[in-house]
Amino acid sequence: MIKAILFCLGFCLISFFSCANTGSRLTATGGITGFEGTAGGGITPWAFISGYGSKEEINGTANVQYLHLNDYTLTTFGASLGIYDRIELSVQRQSLDISSGITSNVFSLLTDGAISAAQSTRIDMDIVSAKVKVLGDGVFTQRSWMPQVAVGAQYKKHRDFDTTLLLPDGSGPLPNQGVARILGAKDDSGTDFFVSATKLYLGHINGFNLLTNLTARYTKANTFGLLGFASENDDSYKVEWEGSLALLTSPSTVIGVEFRTQTNRLGGLAEEDTVTDAFIAYFPNKSFSLTAAYVDLGNLPMQPSSTGFYLTATANF
Amino acid sequence: MSSHLQKIRITTAAIALLLSMLGGISGCTSTQTASQTSASLYDEIGGSKTLNTVFGVAINRIYKDPVIGHYFNGVPKSHLRKQLVSQTCELIGGPCVYEGKAMLETHKDLNIKEREFYILVEYVQGAMRDVGLTYQQENQILQKLAPIKYETIYL
């Protein structure tokens, strides 16, 4: 894991310093890499294709991300390919570290206090995504309200659905039951489908560019899939909504806010709230971007108020 | 419950922050340009004199570009400059009427790539910055010029 991150970081740096041809679209119009690997904002896809490739170009991105929410820490990294400003393909690995405090509390609750200590654990998940721009030009169509529209899918596969939670002595009283399963999730994999409409209004607010995005997501995921997919008594897809509002305050700076609704299928300990964030993204050039955000996830199991900082670095090549 | 309240508070704060920023900014606009229409953008940047400088700088760079320079072989710089100035002047509310040929006509059969169009846009953006236009003025001009994309590429 650490090795992979270092590799990825090294990769970013190499591309940052050595690679001149990052595609010819205008700076910042590739968005940043969201925590699921899809280009857009931090928590929601946009209709823009990753990277800066035009209709004649193929370009790639690589990213590393870090989200710290007290007893939960999400690290994630991945890469994407933007093909002819039409198709985006991406892979992302997410790793959610859960502290022993949280697992201990879960055991304590499940056993009425009989077991009060457990080891920390980690949930790994792989995401493979595709996005296709279907219509519009969100940057250069300025005489009408017409946004750029893209559709996409994110296939998510758990790697720790069956990972036994261990007690300090190494025993596992609930064999082959990972966190997601204990909390009531039914499936270890799922596919989200989404449609995003994105538009950049040039010179819109006292001459500043305003970006708006609305995404509808068709999903079975519990907490983005990190807590599995569907539940024993609810196996149906639901529509969730996501949005971004951002202002380009300089050629290299974007500030904005985002939201993302969740289904709250599992309820109980795993109750889901609407996610919000406020971010600032820095695009010093077309090779590299850095984003910092304050994220509020609401409830996570045994942590009713989960807020923290999110950092994303994306390299373009 | 408390987490809910806190979350709502944070969300509200974040949105309020952005809105107040937007509000503050547009507030400035209304006081600054209350009686002005889009014609003010032309005056605000310094009229044709500034546009001449901007396009003079941009055209010098465009003609030297290894990718797009060749499109302008045989086109006198002064002619292109005049066309671009009068076209932009008209679009941003100046007292000009573009009398050149239609964009669709002049770019027909050139098969200009999207990538090449973006290169040109960046030269114009760069020239506006170097000449000293503000980022806001640059965005507003780009907003007017943007639709030209589909009157130039892949024809």
Image: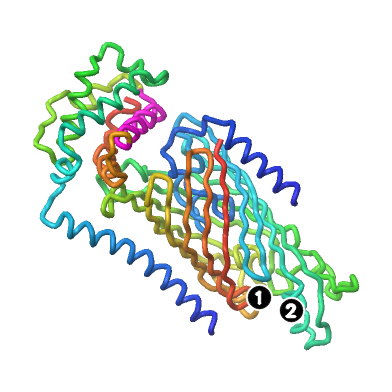
Secondary structure under badge 1? loop
Looking at the rendered image, the quarter that the N terminus of chain B falls into is: bottom right
On screen, residue A67 above or below B106: below
How far, Cα to Cα, is label 2 from label 1? 8 Å
On screen, residue A150 above or below A309: above
On screen, residue B53 above or below A3: above
Q: Which residue is mark 2?
A: A106
Q: Do the numbered discs 2 and 1 sit on residues whose CB atoms are within 8 Å?
A: yes
Q: Amino acid at mark 1?
A: Pro
Question: The residue marked by circle 1 belongs to what chain?
Answer: A
The spot of residue B29 in percent (x, y) is: 21, 56
Q: How many marks?
A: 2
Magenta stretch, main secondary structure, is helix
Quarter holding residue A301: bottom right
The spot of residue A197 in percent (x, y) is: 40, 53
Does mark 1 fall on the same chain as mark 2?
A: yes
The spot of residue A228 in percent (x, y) is: 67, 65
Residue A301: numbered disc: 1
Q: What segment carries the magenta color?
A: B112-129
Residue toward you, A123 or A284: A284
Secondary structure under badge 2? helix
Q: Residues within 10 Å of mark 2 (few under 14, many from 20)?
A: many
Mark found first going from the N terminus, 2 or 1: 2
Q: Residues within 10 Å of mark 1 (few under 14, many from 20)?
A: many
A280 on left or right of A16: left
